[in-house]
Image (spheres, coloured by chain):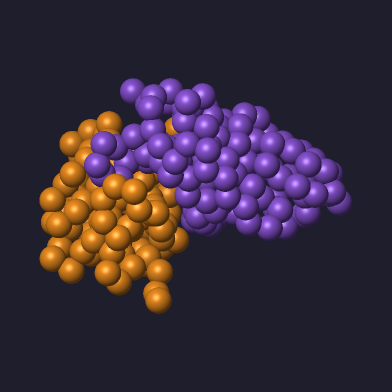
Amino acid sequence: KAGVTQTPRYLIKTRGQQVTLSCSPISGHRSVSWYQQTPGQGLQFLFEYFSETQRNKGNFPGRFSGRQFSNSRSEMNVSTLELGDSALYLCASSLARGRYEQYFGPGTRLTVT
Amino acid sequence: ELKVEQNPLFLSMQEGKNYTIYCNYSTTSDRLYWYRQDPGKSLESLFVLLSNGAVKQEGRLMASLDTKARLSTLHITAAVHDLSATYFCAVDGGTSGSRLTFGEGTQLTVNP
């Protein structure tokens, strides 16, 4: 069974630009969560999507948004990029919400210059 | 707000030795996860602990959960170099969803 895939794997953007990251969950998984990992703040929850609806949101500004499609694939968007948005963005999928293991994708390394 | 604390944050040990990593969390939860991360890589799931008293073992690693003490431990037995990595515990504080709060991570180095 294929794992969680994320595209692109690496991205370099300039301050003020916007970026869209994509995540394809494991086949049959319906819940997708996004996390940001930085050396200073560690791993932080961004949002969770299930059945095309955002179910949970972390403490991030409105510049961070996401969506989920009917096939459970998810995208996250960051507008007006700041230097501090440079991070590893990890997507995780699980069968459903609640007491299910989350499987993480390889991540997208975003560098903002 | 749920807080998760790990200690130690850095651990350097010799091959063959035993050690324990501790994970304390601040609010009630019965869902705790341990992950391993190698440099530049993603998170690999090690253990899922879903009830008080849960104990799971895989190779040289054993994890346990005490929900009353809000404490989980990851015990390393007879460490080998291949275990060198960063280990994270994460607590799911969502009432019905999936929202992991991670500890700071423990960077483990096993020296020959």
In percent of width and height, residue B57 lies at 62, 52
Q: Residue furthest front?
A: B53
**Number of numbered labels in the structure image:** 0
B31 or A108: nearer the viewer: B31
Measuring 39% from the left and 24% from the top, which residue is drawn there?
A: B27
Measuring 71% from the left and 53% from the top, which residue is drawn there?
A: B60
Q: Does residue A69 appear to the left or right of B23 in the view shown?
A: left
Q: Does the image show residue A113?
A: no
Q: Does residue A38 appear to the left or right of A57 in the view shown?
A: right
Q: Does the image show residue B43?
A: yes
B5 or A112: nearer the viewer: B5
The orange-tinted chain is: A
Q: Quadrant of the N terminus of chain B?
A: top left
Q: Report which quarter residue B109 is drawn in.
A: top right
In percent of width and height, residue B50 lies at 43, 44
Chain B: give its colour: purple
Q: Does residue A6 appear to the left or right of B49 in the view shown?
A: left
Q: Residue furthest bottom?
A: A1
Q: Does residue A77 appear to the left or right of B3 in the view shown?
A: left
Residue A49 to residue A85: above or below: below
Measuring 30% from the left and 71% from the top, which residue is drawn there?
A: A27
In percent of width and height, residue B53 lies at 53, 38
Measuring 43% from the left and 49% from the top, which residue is drawn there?
A: A88
In percent of width and height, residue B106 lies at 61, 38
